[in-house]
Image (tube, rainbow, N blue to C red):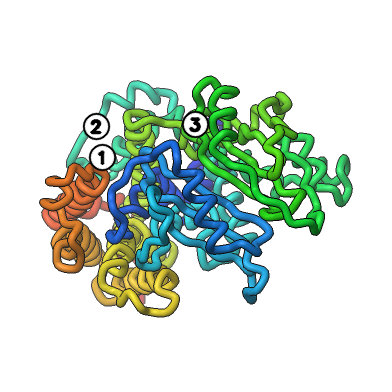
């Protein structure tokens, strides 16, 4: 630690950000992409037709489940909305092996299964940003939660360190080397500072039951279900009676829910024990209508249609947690606010990237005075290239895999992820062969080409190309294709800027150092 409080905070800010910077960059970038999770999934299934949500979607979906999975103990139905044009169903299959889960995509109007390609869609980026995908459920979440703690420390120490933080927001001096990187880092940090604090702290709140479970375990020893019931208002489960009984019509229940919620819309339907006398139908309000992520739901008797549970009122502590959860995932946001979330997420991504580059630039300048760069400096520069320039290229490869891989390929969705990590791994090896600025330029250029050619690839492999979707008014696919072109243009601009950059001459060494070296060389 350094002398003085502010100097100590500067040291803490540097190392708290650097040690986990590459993980934080990946978390920020994939988390920003997760704001477009439904749109990504829709684009990656070109077989899906454009449709509109309607009042009979729930009844159609329940009838489809009665035909497809009459023996299943539970059905989970996600209804279409403005961003999701299909009905998604998920059920337990008692005859299946392994996890015994099945899922399908249904046409919202007919209830017929849609023969769409197997893909991870936007769920890949959503899960990756808090679980790191291949690392594992618990290990990945622990790693991300620890890195998030470092991030919070880096933000708070950065605020303390920069006494001219708001003045720095209006200061940017391009072409000044390390000074320019520091200016860019300050601008990206202050531009969305409230968002950075919110997204980091609420991210920790999401992991609180995993990171700090001791209070719950003490108050509810071995009774986590009882805690969930009391804290979040979940209805206690009902055991099967073993007596067959027809399922009540869901349409009147949907109307009752709409009246109780003053016009609120149902987003999900969960049916437990269908076809049994103890069946229940739970209607869950759409997430886009509430800031809090705590679900507001009505549970009805599955045979009589009588209301048996209303989870509309949760405790103050649970509601605070629900609001923080809702702020983090942003599903309440409309198009304009979602756009601001996207820009703020990109600012956070740039903040982390410029911080890592700033450290490497400073160390390189110090190495110029010493005469050689150390292993730590070379390692950071190598990882900066692979993380900052390589991750967008890997994301482009993920989208390419969706279009190029054969539709009948076994585990096709998993292979999309394999292609992503293979491409990212090659980006890690590439700087060993093409060092320094050449590696930056080539990876940025490859990413730019990958994104820019995706609309062309889309036209070659599907009928959902840009002119066709524009003619049909399928604006989700139109804007997504334009967004891909925008990503390609941005990466191309970065490649061009890096290619044109000429590093400044090494700083002159102090005269005393030169004199000592001359004496050492002259000594016998």
Q: Which of 382 and 474 is in front in this view?
A: 474
Pointer 3 residue: 265
Q: Earlier in the sequence, mark 2 or mark 3?
A: 2
Judged by depth in the image, the label closer to the viewer, 2 or 3, is 3
Residue beneath disc 1: 180
Of residue 13 and residue 118, the one placed in the foreground of this image is 118
User: In the rendered image, which quarter is residue 444 located in?
Assistant: bottom left
How many neighbours does mark 3 have within 10 angstroms: few (below 14), some (14-19), or many (20 or more)? many
Where residue 128 appears, x then y in whole percent?
Answer: 48, 57
Residue 51 vs 449, above or below: the answer is above
> Is tag 1's residue or tag 2's residue first in the polypeptide sequence?
2
Residue depth check, mark 1 versus mark 3: number of the one nearer the observer: 3
Q: Would residue 34 be seen by someone viewing this image from the given angle?
A: yes
Distance from disc 1 to disc 3, alpha carbons, whole Å, reads 50 Å
Q: Are marks 1 and 3 in contact (CB under 8 Å)?
A: no
The local secondary structure at tag 2 comes to: loop
The C terminus sits in image quarter:
bottom left
Disc 2 marks which residue?
Answer: 172
Helix, strand or loop under label 3: loop
User: Residue 360 — which label?
Assistant: none
Residue drawn 16% across the image and 56% down it: 465
Q: Position of residue 333 (x, y in %)?
A: 42, 31
| Mark 2 to mark 3 CA distance (whole Å) | 47 Å
Say whether marks 1 and 2 touch (CB < 8 Å). yes
Across and down, in percent, residue 204 comes to: 60, 41
Disc 2 and disc 3 in contact, CB within 8 angstroms: no
């Amino acid at each position: 630690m350094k002398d003085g409080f502010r100097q100590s905070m500067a040291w803490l800010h540097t190392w708290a950000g650097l040690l986990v910077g590459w993980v934080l960059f990946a978390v920020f970038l994939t988390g920003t992409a997760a704001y477009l999770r439904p749109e990504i999934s829709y684009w990656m299934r070109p077989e899906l037709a454009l449709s509109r949500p309607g009042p009979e979607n729930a009844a159609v979906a329940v009838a489809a489940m009665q035909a497809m999975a009459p023996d299943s103990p539970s059905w989970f139905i996600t209804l279409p909305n403005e961003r999701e044009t299909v009905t998604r169903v998920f059920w337990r299959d008692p005859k299946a092996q392994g996890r015994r889960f099945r899922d399908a995509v249904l046409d919202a109007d007919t209830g017929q299964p849609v023969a769409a390609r197997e893909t991870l869609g936007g769920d890949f980026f959503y899960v990756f940003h808090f679980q790191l995908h291949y690392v594992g459920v618990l290990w990945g979440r622990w790693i991300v939660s620890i890195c998030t703690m470092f991030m919070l420390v880096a933000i708070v120490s950065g605020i303390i360190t920069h006494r001219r933080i708001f003045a720095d927001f209006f200061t940017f001096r391009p072409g000044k080397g390390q000074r320019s990187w520091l200016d860019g880092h300050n601008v990206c940090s202050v531009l969305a500072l409230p968002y950075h604090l919110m997204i980091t702290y609420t991210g920790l709140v999401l992991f609180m039951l995993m990171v700090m479970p001791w209070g719950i375990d003490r108050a509810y020893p071995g009774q986590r279900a009882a805690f969930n019931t009391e804290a979040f208002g979940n209805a206690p489960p009902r055991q099967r009676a073993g007596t067959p009984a027809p399922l009540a019509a869901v349409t009147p229940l949907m109307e009752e829910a709409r009246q109780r919620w003053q016009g609120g819309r149902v987003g999900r339907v969960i049916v437990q024990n269908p076809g049994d006398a103890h069946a229940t139908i739970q209607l869950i309000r759409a997430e886009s209508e509430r800031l809090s992520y705590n679900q507001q739901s009505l549970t009805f008797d599955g045979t009589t249609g009588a209301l048996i549970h209303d989870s509309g009122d949760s405790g103050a502590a649970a509601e605070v947690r629900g609001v923080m959860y809702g702020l983090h995932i942003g599903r309440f946001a409309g198009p304009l606010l979602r756009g601001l979330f996207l820009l703020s997420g990109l600012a956070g991504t740039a903040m982390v990237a410029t911080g890592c580059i700033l450290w490497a630039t400073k160390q390189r300048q110090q190495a110029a005075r010493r005469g050689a760069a150390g292993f730590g400096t070379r390692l950071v520069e190598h990882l900066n290239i692979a993380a900052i320039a390589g991750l967008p290229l890997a994301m482009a490869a993920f989208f390419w895999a969706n279009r190029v891989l054969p539709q009948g390929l076994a585990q096709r969705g998993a292979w999309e992820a394999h292609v992503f990590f293979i491409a990212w791994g090659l980006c890690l090896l590439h700087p060993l062969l093409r060092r320094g600025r050449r590696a930056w330029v080539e990876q940025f250029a490859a990413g730019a080409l990958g994104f820019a050619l995706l609309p062309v690839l889309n036209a070659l492999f599907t009928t959902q190309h840009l002119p066709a979707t524009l003619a049909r008014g399928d604006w989700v696919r139109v804007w997504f294709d334009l967004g891909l072109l925008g990503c390609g243009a941005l990466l191309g601009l970065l490649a061009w800027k890096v290619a044109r950059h000429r590093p400044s001459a090494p700083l002159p060494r102090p005269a005393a150092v030169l004199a000592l070296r001359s004496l050492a060389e002259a000594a016998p």
